[in-house]
């Protein structure tokens, strides 16, 4: 799929539609802001050490205080699907593409797109690496591609 | 097309199966009220069954188009940018003559807001919002007698 | 409840957030703050909470806040009566603990409406967000579709247990077999396994015929007491027990194992409350948004072991003469699915127990289960109904 670039204007002359960008709030701003700068972050609990995503106010396990640490970007595919039907722009112009859940090396599981390979080559257990891309002026997202 | 009191950007109604007849009458500049044909009770807005006797049999009865202001408010704050030059305007609940107690929320136009009173007599003034949609506003009327 | 064992509902902890300005917290973060403080006031931890209630302005709001707090509650309430909601939620919670349906119910409220007016959601070019505040945004960024979530669960089930597309297809075939006898069903022409796996892929590995239909429709029921029903024309059907749970909301990444659903929490609890085991169930109405949903549900409700759902449903396993007659009206896969078909499950279960189902009647049905699945395998609710009083 064309990762974060918008699709070209369609035959009807409508302007290209970008892929959805996240709404930023006090929980999400740090994560997506860092991704905009090319850094993948996870929350780590200062009391029990658990790592978590998505961002919450406190630790999911023990309600301890959390801060941000940089993640390696390495992950494994937990499950995936090849989307072959989606009527919404811009995705309908990019079929087929892969939506996956990947487990970061640090522990948390995130949803993403697997890019940089044929959708038919994706496998559960495959090693992947984050590729951070901007998606709006103040947010980036983490796509994943096969680890080299 | 009639005079326009409100801008095109106003939120527009969506007709449903129960209300379509009412809106079609409005497009023809006819003020009507739904009346149960089993027990005679009127209702507004139109609905699928009579709240009194639960019958689904109903008709749309023509009204004279006059009424009395039951209560009102003067809106000073534009809730959409297009109304910034329109405020202040008057939103009122009007008791419709001949409607068995049915009351319509509408706007009172062609009068200064400070001159609107409860009990004021008003008559419908249709505003064509588009080729198939007219909304009933109300303007003050003088009635005969000293 | 006899007086000897009576459980008396109480409020054990209370708290407020910092207020009136909370620019540093998200709306869900406010829920987190008051949850921590109220539990601390009560001398309890979040791990001891088994019930959760709140009210907000979006569908499944309570389920979303539960996901945010990491809760998997087995009692949920989101009754929204506007400003009075929280009194109602506490009243309901009192009934729940009194009835033994919950031990500790956390009721929270959170809002950042003042800060949100000043904080433009989706700032920057092209920022659209997901509309709804909070966590739902995370999984919404990837062009995933609703089917895609169930597809990822199906792929995982195939990976872990060797379930095949043909086994999933068997569910659709049986639902269609039942719909043949339902004059109102949206689709009534019989289909084969080959038809299902030959239909086009929507989100790998789910094909078009693995997915429910899209319909209009509605359903309803009336709940009263057996005493009142004694004067009514039809034999009443008894509610023997029920239970529900949520594990996450719309972020599949928060679900944990994709091959076990909230039914594993709601099913055993409902059966225990009803005093039955899976072997006692004569007929089942199971939410069939997708074929995989049914396979996961029969496992999680205990009709077969985890991983054996594929074998359970194939070769007519869910048919009238099979292991567990299921969705005798044709289900969401063939009859109708207006978006949330849980009430249809209850109606068909009642009709089975009344003996009204004609060609799809399970002879002598005495115990029926209706199980609803919501969100993206996020919630489960199991109802056990019986022909006779408990």
Image (cartoon, coloured by chain):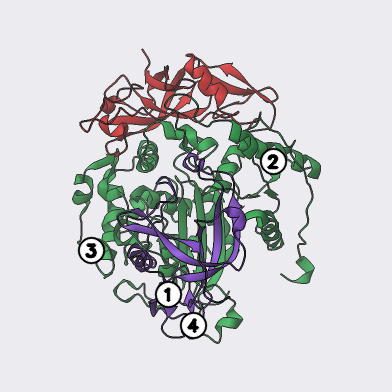
Chain colours: A red, B purple, C green
Q: Quadrant of residue A115?
A: top left
Q: Which mark is residue C218?
A: none
Q: Secondary structure at mark 1?
A: loop
Q: CA distance from mark 4 to mark 2?
A: 52 Å
Cβ atoms at labels 1 and 3 below 8 Å apart: no
Which residue is located at x 38 percent, y 50 percent?
A: C295
Gap between marks 1 and 3, in whole Å? 50 Å
Residue at mark 4: chain? B
Q: Are marks 4 and 3 in contact (CB under 8 Å)?
A: no
For residue C195, above or below residue A120? below
Labels 4 and 2 positioned on one and the same chain: no
List the single residue furthest toward the front: B146
Which residue has dot 3 on it?
A: C188
Q: Residues within 10 Å of mark 1 (few under 14, many from 20)?
A: some
Q: Would residue B124 be found to the left or right of residue C24 on screen? A: left
**Residue at the spot of label 2:** C46
Residue B63: which disc? 1
Residue B53 numbered mark, or none? 4
Can residue C249 be spotted in the picture?
yes
Q: Secondary structure at mark 3?
A: loop
| Distance from the alpha carbon under mark 4 to that under mark 1 | 23 Å
Please state the chain letter of the residue tagged with numbered disc 3 in the rendered image: C
Q: Nearer the viewer, residue C388 or C232?
A: C232
Asked which secondary structure carries label 4, the reply is: loop
Looking at the rendered image, the disc whose residue lies closer to the viewer, 4 or 3, is 4
Q: Which percent across, then down, holds residue C276?
A: 54, 65
> Disc 2 sits on a residue from what chain?
C
Q: Are marks 1 and 3 on the same chain?
A: no
Alpha carbons under labels 4 and 3: distance apart: 39 Å
Work out how far the residue at label 3 is from the one at label 2, CA to CA, in angstroms: 49 Å
């Amino acid at each position: 799929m064309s990762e974060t670039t918008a699709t070209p204007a369609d035959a009807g002359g409508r302007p290209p539609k970008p892929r959805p960008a996240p709404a930023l709030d006090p929980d999400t701003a740090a994560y997506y802001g860092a991704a905009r700068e090319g850094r993948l972050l996870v929350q780590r609990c200062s009391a029990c050490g658990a790592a978590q995503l998505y961002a919450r106010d406190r630790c999911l396990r023990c309600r301890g205080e959390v801060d941000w640490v940089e993640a390696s970007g390495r992950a494994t595919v937990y499950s995936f699907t090849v989307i072959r039907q989606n009527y919404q722009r811009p995705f309908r112009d990019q079929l087929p593409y892969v939506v996956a859940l990947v487990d970061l090396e640090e522990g948390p599981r995130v949803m993403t797109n697997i890019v940089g390979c044929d959708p038919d080559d994706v496998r559960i257990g495959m090693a992947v690496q984050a590729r951070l891309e901007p998606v709006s002026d103040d947010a980036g997202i983490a796509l994943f591609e096969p680890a080299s | 097309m009639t005079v326009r009191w409100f801008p095109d950007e106003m939120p527009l109604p969506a007709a449903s199966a129960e209300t379509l007849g009412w809106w079609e009458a409005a497009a023809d500049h006819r003020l009507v009220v739904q009346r149960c044909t089993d027990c005679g009770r009127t209702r507004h807005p139109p609905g699928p069954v009579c709240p009194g006797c639960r019958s689904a049999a109903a008709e749309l009865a023509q009204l004279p188009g006059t009424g009395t202001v039951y209560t009102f408010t003067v809106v000073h704050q534009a809730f959409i940018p297009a109304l910034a030059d329109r405020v202040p305007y008057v939103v009122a609940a009007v008791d419709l003559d001949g409607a068995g107690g049915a009351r319509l929320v509408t706007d009172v136009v062609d009068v200064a807001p400070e001159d609107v009173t409860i009990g004021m007599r008003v008559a419908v003034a249709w505003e064509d919002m588009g080729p198939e949609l007219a909304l009933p506003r109300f303007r003050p009327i003088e009635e005969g007698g000293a | 409840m006899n007086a000897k064992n009576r459980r008396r509902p109480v409020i054990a902890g209370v708290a407020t957030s910092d207020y009136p300005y909370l620019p540093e917290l998200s709306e869900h973060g406010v829920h987190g703050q008051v949850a921590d403080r109220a539990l601390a006031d009560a001398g309890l931890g979040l791990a001891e909470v088994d019930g959760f209630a709140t009210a907000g302005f979006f569908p499944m709001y309570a389920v979303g806040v539960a996901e945010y707090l990491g809760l998997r509650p087995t009692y949920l309430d989101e009754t929204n009566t506007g400003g009075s909601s929280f009194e109602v939620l506490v009243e309901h919670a009192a009934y729940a603990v009194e009835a033994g349906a919950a031990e500790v119910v956390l009721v929270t409220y959170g809002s950042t409406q003042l800060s949100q007016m000043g904080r433009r959601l989706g700032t920057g070019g092209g920022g659209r967000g997901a509309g709804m505040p909070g966590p739902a945004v995370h999984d919404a960024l990837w062009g995933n579709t609703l089917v895609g979530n169930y597809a990822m669960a199906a792929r995982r089930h195939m990976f872990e247990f060797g379930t095949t597309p043909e086994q999933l297809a068997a569910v659709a075939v049986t639902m269609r077999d039942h719909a043949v006898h339902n004059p109102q069903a949206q689709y009534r022409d019989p289909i084969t396994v080959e038809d299902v796996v030959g239909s086009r892929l929507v989100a790998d590995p789910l094909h078009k015929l693995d997915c429910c239909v899209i319909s209009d429709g509605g359903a309803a029921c009336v709940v009263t007491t057996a005493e009142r029903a004694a004067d009514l024309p039809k034999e009443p059907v008894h509610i023997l027990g029920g239970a529900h749970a949520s594990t996450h909301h719309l972020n599949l990444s928060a679900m944990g194992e994709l091959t076990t659903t909230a039914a594993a929490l709601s099913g055993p609890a409902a059966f225990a409350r009803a005093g039955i085991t899976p072997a006692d169930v004569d007929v089942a109405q199971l939410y069939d948004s997708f074929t995989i949903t049914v396979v996961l549900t029969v496992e999680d409700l205990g009709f077969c072991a985890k991983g054996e759902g594929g074998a359970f449903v194939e070769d007519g396993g869910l048919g009238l003469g099979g292991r567990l007659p299921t969705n005798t009206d044709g289900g969401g896969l063939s009859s109708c699915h207006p978006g949330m078909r849980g009430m249809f499950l209850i109606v068909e279960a009642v009709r089975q127990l009344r003996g009204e189902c004609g060609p799809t009647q399970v002879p002598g049905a005495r115990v029926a289960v209706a199980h609803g699945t919501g969100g993206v395998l996020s919630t489960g609710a199991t109802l056990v109904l019986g022909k006779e009083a408990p």
